[in-house]
Amino acid sequence: MSTIGANAPADRGELALVLHSHMPYVEGFGTWPFGEEWLWEAVATVYLPLLEVLRDAPVTIGLTPVLCDQLESLAGEAGERFAGFISGTRAEVHAEDSAGLDRAGEDVLAGELRRAAGDYESGLRRFDAIDRDLVGAFLALARDGPTELWTGPATHPVLPLIASEAGVRLQLATGLASHQRRFDGFGGGFWLPECAYAPGLERVLAEHGVRGFCVDQTDALGLGSLDQLEPIATAAGPIAVPIDWQTVALVWDSDSGYPVGGGYRDHHRRTVHDLKPWCNAGGAYDHGAALRLARSHAEDFVGRAIARLDAYRSERGRRGLLCCALDAELLGHWWYEGPAWLAAVLEVAADRGLALCTLPDALERVDAVERPLAASSWGIPKDLTTWDSPRVAELAFATRSAELRTVAAAGVVSSGHEAGNGGPPRRAPLERAARELLALQSSDWAFQVTRELAGDYPLSRVRDHGESLDAALAALEDSRLAVPAPALRNLAPDLDLAGLIVP
């Protein structure tokens, strides 16, 4: 057992911090303002700093296979592009904008940009210090300490919206195969993309070895209900862990969460080259003051978590499990001071007797209850409309059509193989079609359209992947046609077609 908070009361219960780390496949797909620079920014400002913060911390980290596909690619030519972005583009724009502010008489703002440029310099040093192997660094974090690594389906699809069992199996088998290879096995911890759950999903998860997953039951149980602190046993075997939105909202709420504090760096107000030297209150950003505010908010967070667990113990007479799940990219990118806040939470929890634990450890000690699970997501609203509504109808129909056509084509290949006609020449285009399908099924495209976050980039990606899938299926039907040249360089390197081609 590994916990932080050795002085915690034995019957208080525990806090499980879950950091869900994910990036759609953007490596090689466009640059500023959308595309692979999203990945470079996340590596420099989120993943590398978190590796430092989480050393020896009992925290559960979800690493999606599609994110790891891209982190793995950094060991090669993609890593050179990342290094060039940090030492070139980022250094140049910080220097140019700070000089412009100096000329305008804004010395304090200019000084802040020069300080912030050091974040990227530090990131590049960290990158080289781990031999550009982020996957290996996360493996070492879990192997040498109490951190737990969870995985998910191949490309972060909304699983209840996949049309066929074969499509679900393709996502699960491919994602798990990659995780097992990279991280020396699979312990059963699984992040449901978008926490999107529909009754019955636990059965197929169980078939693939899943032992635990997170759900958002806020609408079903009520915001603030102590029922949120009880893991839920499913008849199929896996344990569903409700995330406690009352606790999550302390960080996540866009109107009242910690990141909107006046002293924190303003994510929205920017210089010519999108740099951020201002604070939320409107003045120049003061990094020292922001770090002190992060410490204060960490103390508040720990106090509220203790109160929540103690209230559960007082009412129910047993230990509770308080699960706070956050997107890792919130910490460092959207909320610049997030890593400092997290580091302070770990420290304050130890000082104040709040036990932190990984979900697998907690599920060994906290009894699960039997309770129906409602269909849900952690979207806004907490259903599937972010990914399945008239606003995203074009994406939804294109993805579902592509899936059904790929599954049908796989059935033909399977029949042909039995007749002696389904060898390697036909497998290559099917593999290409399957990879394009996986790319299409990412939940990110519909999310970006619904939230108006990335212009026409998601629609362009969906159309391009659809066209490549069509070309691959055409080559599958007519061997005289060439399979299109690959663009998804390292997507799903452990592609498992068994679920598609086996009846």
Image (cartoon, rainbow, N blue to C red):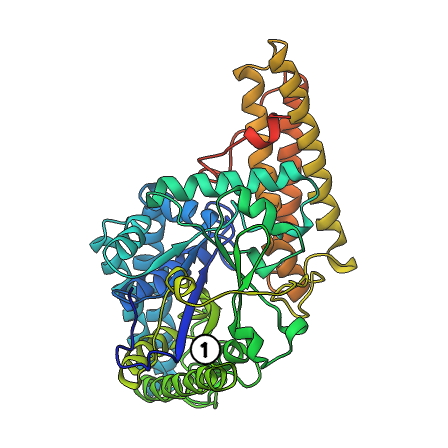
**Residue 109 horizontal/vertical position (percent):** 37, 84
Q: Quadrant of the N terminus?
A: bottom left
Q: Can residue 484 be seen in this snapshot?
A: no
Give the residue drawn at x 67%, y 44%.
463
Give the residue drawn at x 37%, y 83%.
298
Q: Can residue 192 be seen in this snapshot?
A: yes
Q: Amino acid at mark 1?
A: Arg
Give the residue drawn at x 44%, y 87%.
307
In the picture provided, is 118 more to the left or to the right than 420? left
Residue 453 drawn above or below residue 350: above
Read off the residue under disc 1: 318
In the picture provided, is 460 more to the left or to the right than 135? right
**Residue 432 horizontal/vertical position (percent):** 56, 30
Which type of secondary structure does the marked residue at label 1 adopt? loop
**Residue 455 horizontal/vertical position (percent):** 63, 60
Give the residue drawn at x 55%, y 30%.
497
